[in-house]
Amino acid sequence: MKFLRIFLLMNLIGFLLSMASVRFRISYTNELKLKISYLFFSYTVFPKKKKPPKAEKAKTKQPEEKKKENLFLKVYHEKGLKGLLHLLKALADMAGHALKTLFQHIRVKLLSLHVAVAEEDAAKTALTFGEVCGVVYPTFSVLTETMKCSKFEVAVVPDFQAKKTKIQGKADLKIRVAVLLMTAVQALIRYMKTIKSAKISDKTKSKKAVQ
């Protein structure tokens, strides 16, 4: 009886924790900043704290293998307008296709972006302005139609007086842990099915080759 009570209590706690939301606060001012909060805990993903330099021992240099970066890490390293456009294109693709179901469960308190496009000369500014508009406005259309947005604002303007593009962006959003877990399980199931079908295909090919 005692074990049953503990079991039910643990399940209740797990259920309540899964119903809580994870909060993502994102800001972009020529550099990506990301902070994740859950209940009383928070963690700053970007910018990363600089570690003090360590005394390195003399070692023979070996060719370093290039590691694949995740989307946010890649954008963080790219910085500026290039990084912003890369991020927006990826988000539009995920919200419209790959992770549409996940994005539908996201609750957005604030989503804003202001870009003042500036280049070395007026002609280049005009071209860049058209390119930025072609990415920003369609992306915001997809995101605001897919997610539950309380407030959003977007503006892209050309600045022929300045010499450098200025970016001001903010996003404050929440999603329940249960939704994240469900999405992860579904992704794992799809992955296992893909691996299984690939193995079956390889076996079929090998049998045909033997025959």
Image (cartoon, grey):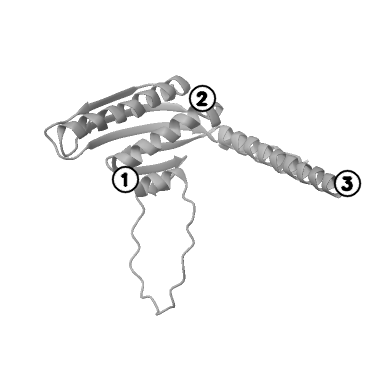
Q: Is residue 89 left or right of residue 161?
A: right
Q: Residue at x 22, y 26 (%)?
A: 157
Residue placed under numbered mark 3 in the picture: 211
Q: Residues within 10 Å of mark 3 (few under 14, many from 20)?
A: few
- Horizontal side of residue 121 vs 211, given as left or right: left
Instruction: Please tell me which residue lies in front, 169 or 209.
Output: 209
Locate residue 98: give its quadrant. top right
Residue 166, how many percent across, how many down? Answer: 22, 37
Q: Quadrant of the N terminus?
A: top right
The Cα atoms of the two marked residues, 2 and 1, are separated by 28 Å
Residue 28's quadrant in the figure?
A: top left
* Residue 57 seen in render: yes
Front: mark 2 or 1: 1
Compute the Cα span from label 3 to label 1: 56 Å
- Which label belongs to residue 104? 2
Residue 138 at x, y percent in the picture: 38, 23
Q: Circle 3 sits in a helix, a strand or a loop, which is it?
A: loop
- Discs 3/1, front: 3
Identified at 64% across, 35% down, the residue is 186
Tell me if mark 1 has few (under 14), some (14-19) or many (20+) residues whose alpha carbon lies within 10 angstroms of its own: some
Q: Quadrant of residue 201?
A: top right
- Lower position in the chain sequence, tag 3 or tag 2: 2
N-term mark: 3 or 1 = 1
Which numbered disc flags the more N-terminal residue, 2 or 1? Answer: 1
Residue lying at the far bottom of the rendered structure? 58
Residue 79's disc number: 1
Residue 35 vs 53, above or below: the answer is above
User: Closer to us: mark 3 or mark 2?
Assistant: 3
Is 100 on the left or on the right of 1, as rendered?
A: left
Q: Inspect the image, locate mark 2, and give the three-letter code of the amino acid beneath it.
A: Gln
Dot 2: within a 10 Å radius of its alpha carbon, few (fewer than 14), some, or many (20 or more) residues? some
